[in-house]
Amino acid sequence: MENALIKTAKFGGSSLADAGQFRKVRDIVTSDQTVRYVVASAPGKRFAGDVKVTDMFYECYGCSYDNLKFGELFGKIKNRFNSIIEELGIDYSLEKEYEEIEDSLRHSTGRDYSASRGEYLNGKILAAYLGFDFIDAFDMVFFREDGSFDSEKTNAVLSERLKNSVRAVIPGFYGSMPNGTVKTFSRGGSDVTGSIVARASQSDIYENWTDVSGFLVADPRIVDNPKTIRAITYRELRELSYMGASVLHEEAIFPVRTCGIPINIRNTNTPDEPGTMIMPSCPADGNGEITGIAGKKGFSVINIEKDLMNMQHGFGRKVLSVLENSGINYEHLPSGIDTMSVIVNTEDIAPYRNMVMNNICTTVEPDSISIEDGIALIAIVGRNMARAKGTAARILRAVADADVNVRMIDQGSDEINIILGVDENDFERAIRAIYAKFEERI
Ligand code: ASP
């Protein structure tokens, strides 16, 4: 085993929603002996309109005072797990665990404890079904007093433990606080656990199994049948995720990124498809001029004008300090000689809008200042754009031909992204036009 490949595979809620999905997971795991560590989510939705077990547990926590409602809900949760066990035909019982959990919930243990039980119970079933060890994340994943994740302690304890287990299932999403209570990551956090386990086991690859065949080049609600991204770097992924593309929890890349472990997004329902590889760096492969397009609505632009602004020392800093004092982040900062625009999230500035505008006025005494809402930002991301010629021209040609006015253009210093600001009404049209222009070059 010494130098053999090691894989960590995380299966999401839809991949473990019922017995049928469990069977697919077993086929995937048993057909690849290098999969040594499996991270399990709680059972997700089986069909549109179904309820995730995690949501059932949250609801359970909220009604532990109401005997009748609690009993009914907890009964439904037990039925979901029991039907998985029965349909799999395994000789296994969770009665002891149910009793313990019911008792804890009735004595008002925390909300996170309740939410975490979906992963805990599903992990136990999966371990029994696969014949793997069960390692409770409570004993291995640690948070600090202030609620932040304690990466060093977790990695030290977990890596020692994993050395003693050839194959194991670890429930995702939760860990423990120094005071011995359960704490969860934010929603979708089993992705983070998968990454933590991959790092601690020094896996060669972190497979993240879900219900889509990887990252798409553009949002399928906007573009018909967009292509799948085959390979993407961590940095490109950050840019796209920040602008709204989501398949993976935002924090999931950090543990594996530190040691360069690639993440492979795969589809449990079509396991033959290669999915998307997320890597520290990808070969610049000639084609693939852009990697992905993502965007978000809901931005506002503060326009500031002042004659001879360019001569005033500290003008920009003073404007930004007004935002900082109200705890508002800015997104972009396009400027001219005597003009400066600050793009901010409309929702973030809403409670402080008048105060911020007044404070900018008193701090820098502009000739004019205004704020406009309804701006959408579009990020065109691609490692191959760096030092390539003509990409920006092609993007602007595409939006101009689609009759879209560009309100702002920004390019990151690493040249892997170009951000356009457009009116929200033009958002979808602009994305479709850019995708169409680059479709052949992706
Ligand atoms: N079950 C949790 C949720 O629904 C965590 C996860 O699935 O990753 O958010």
Image: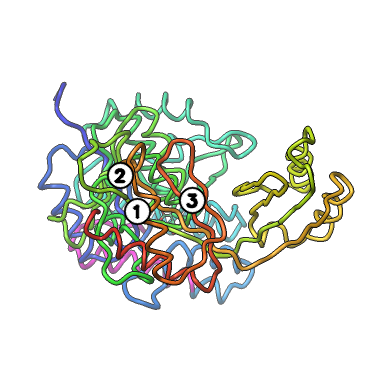
Q: Secondary structure at mark 1?
A: strand
Residue 232, which numbered label? 2
In the rendering, at what x and y percent does residue 13 appear? 35, 59
Report the residue at 57% width, 43% height from top.
181
Please say whether residue 197 is visible from this viewpoint: yes
Mark 2 near mark 1, Cβ–Cβ under 8 Å?
yes
Q: Please state the horizontal and vertical placement of residue 221, each as a whole percent of the image.
A: 37, 71
Task: Give me the residue at 83% from left, 60% from top.
Answer: 354
Residue 357 image position (x, y, % from top left): 81, 56
Q: Which residue is mark 3?
A: 242
Mark-to-mark CA distance, 2 and 1? 9 Å
Decide: few, some or many residues near mark 3? Use Cα within 10 Å; few <14, some 14-19, many ≥20: some
Q: Quadrant of the N terminus?
A: top left
**If you read the primary sequence from the N terminus, does the residue marked by circle 3 or circle 1 appear first?**
3
Helix, strand or loop for disc 2: strand
Magenta residues, as a range?
Answer: 73-95
Q: Which residue is mark 1?
A: 292
Q: Are marks 2 and 3 in contact (CB under 8 Å)?
A: no
Mark 2: amino acid: Ile
Residue 187 rendering spot, x and y as whole percentages: 49, 55
Query: Dividing the image into four equal quarters, which quarter contains ligand 1?
Result: bottom left
Amino acid marked by disc 1: Gly
Image quadrant where residue 408 sits: bottom right
Q: Residue at x 31, y 55 (%)?
A: 215
